[in-house]
Image (cartoon, rainbow, N blue to C red):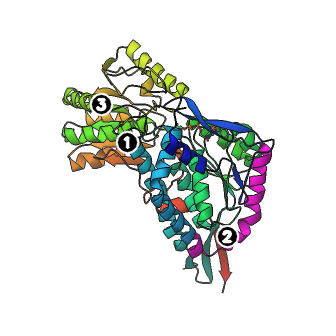
Amino acid sequence: MSTNVTEQTIIDKVEKRLYVGGEWRDAAGGGTLSVEDPSTGEAICEVADATPEDAMAALDAASEVQKEWAKHPPRKRGEILRRAYEKLVERIDELALLMTLEMGKPIGESKGEILYAADFLRWFSEEAVRIDGRYAVAPNGAGRLLTMKQPVGPCLAITPWNFPMAMGTRKIGPAIAAGCTIIVKPAQLTPLSMLALAQILEESGLPPGVLNVITSSSSGATMSPLISDRRLRKLTFTGSTPVGRKLMEQASGNLLRLSMELGGNAPFLVFDDADLDAAVEGAMLAKMRNIGEACTAANRFHVADSVADEFSEKLVEKMSALKVGRGTEEGVQVGPLIDDDQRGKVSDLVEDALSKGAKALVGAGKMDGRGYFYEPTVLGDVPEDADLRQEEIFGPVAPIFSVSSEEEAIEAANNTEYGLVAYVYTRDLKRALRVCEGLETGMVGLNRGMVSNASAPFGGVKHSGFGREGGAEGIEEYLETKYISVDL
Ligand code: NAP
């Protein structure tokens, strides 16, 4: 047994059943699925394993209360979100421990995610009362043009394992604020944080049926009947590009409104006029936040050749000093990868790069012992044909490429199917603006290694998806515009 008494108490406190229509219930047939601690590879608990029948019950519940919820006063919808925000902050210690146990990231980072997740509830509690419309005089003067915003209707949210709570609140917050009901299916690898969040929203006064949570080991079979059901009106997905593409195809039959937050391959550009120490600090954040398992993770470093050696040396020094271990331990900065498959993918990408001529400046290996640990790694002299140049690494590996001009840097940055975020380090304002304009991404970190912020529109272009989460744009994803033509 690896879990201690405190950890066990936290795990015991969380509901392990499905949340449907305001009730906690076992899966039809009583099936369960195991949740594992990636730092030990051991199961820590079982949660309900939903069937398509359970998912349909969730849609029944969400559809039944949709009309009533849409009429619920915006101020009251906002107040529920605000209470949930406060409870999340109050319980940050236990929720962070729970997240670390199921996902592996160090406790400090789990706390960071709880605050980030809570911030979406606070932001959308404020947005709930700012939904408005327009009144205009028709150009011919004879009529009036009115527009009003109304909730889209019942939504389905499918979320990934890498940010088990924040990827949920980015969808649940605006849905509730807009007056939509919602069914959430978290990743089977990390269902506990979402179940804990549902308990908090329930305690905060969310009426039955507005939020429903379905945990399942068979996502495709469980979700597809919902996606084709006429009562569902929106699908919001965060996950990989291949799964997003598949879900878009399925959703086309039912013409669902879609939001797609998909994979990334973020370039990190360092120009010769950059503050190199700041660039290295930013690189550590952009690369190592969440053990490199972030859609926003810097996937490739394109560094001006005149400063590439110095940048590499400084980065190697920082990466070598990182403490790797179980996320619950004091001082640990890098936890395990989520599972052996993910570690295998990272290892294959590194081996491929090395076989094509890249040099391991530090790391480049799986770590012995229990759990799915991988060494913080820096690769130099990486050839352009290395697979990790085009594929999302999703691990603690920093490949460095050198570039000889600004044009080459922009071209290299854009040479990918993805377009979520890019990072740019330069002290030249004109260059900064030129480069930001030239980048084909939804977001840019300018002299910053992190862009996430609940009050800003997060999202990508190209194969990183479409739609925005957070900011003033976030709630629009859950609203339809109705136009009324008035004859005076
Ligand atoms: P994934 O394999 O695409 O899974 C994401 C979610 O989709 C999980 O809940 C998964 O359920 C579910 N799913 C898989 N196949 C499905 C199907 N056929 N029908 C319905 N649901 C299905 O991605 P992941 O490995 O969890 O997450 C990593 C990916 O997410 C990376 O590519 C990362 O870049 C991306 N991501 C993007 C953003 C963004 O905002 N752009 C943010 C975070 C992560 P199960 O796992 O339970 O099967």
Name the quadrant of the N terminus.
Answer: top right
Does 428 sit above or below residue 315? below
User: Which is the main secondary structure of the residues drawn in magenta?
Assistant: helix
Q: Which residue is mark 2?
A: 70
Query: Callout 1: 10 Å neighbours few (<14), some, many (20+)?
Result: many
Q: Indicate which label's residue lies in the foreground, 3 or 1.
A: 3
* Amino acid type shown at disc 2: Ala
Q: Quadrant of residue 280?
A: top left
Q: Which residue is mark 3?
A: 319
Sequence-wise, the earlier of marks 1 and 2 is 2
* Amino acid type shown at disc 3: Met
Q: Is residue 461 visible?
A: no
Which image quarter has ligand 1? top right
Look at the image and give the residue range highlighted in magenta.
52-77
Q: Which residue is mark 1?
A: 422
Q: Is residue 292 left or right of residue 134?
A: left
Sequence-wise, the earlier of marks 2 and 3 is 2
**Residue 301: in magenta span:** no
Q: Quadrant of residue 65?
A: bottom right
Beta carbon of the mark 1 residue lies under 8 A of ligand 1:
no
Q: Quadrant of residue 400?
A: top left
Q: Is residue 153 left or right of residue 421?
A: right
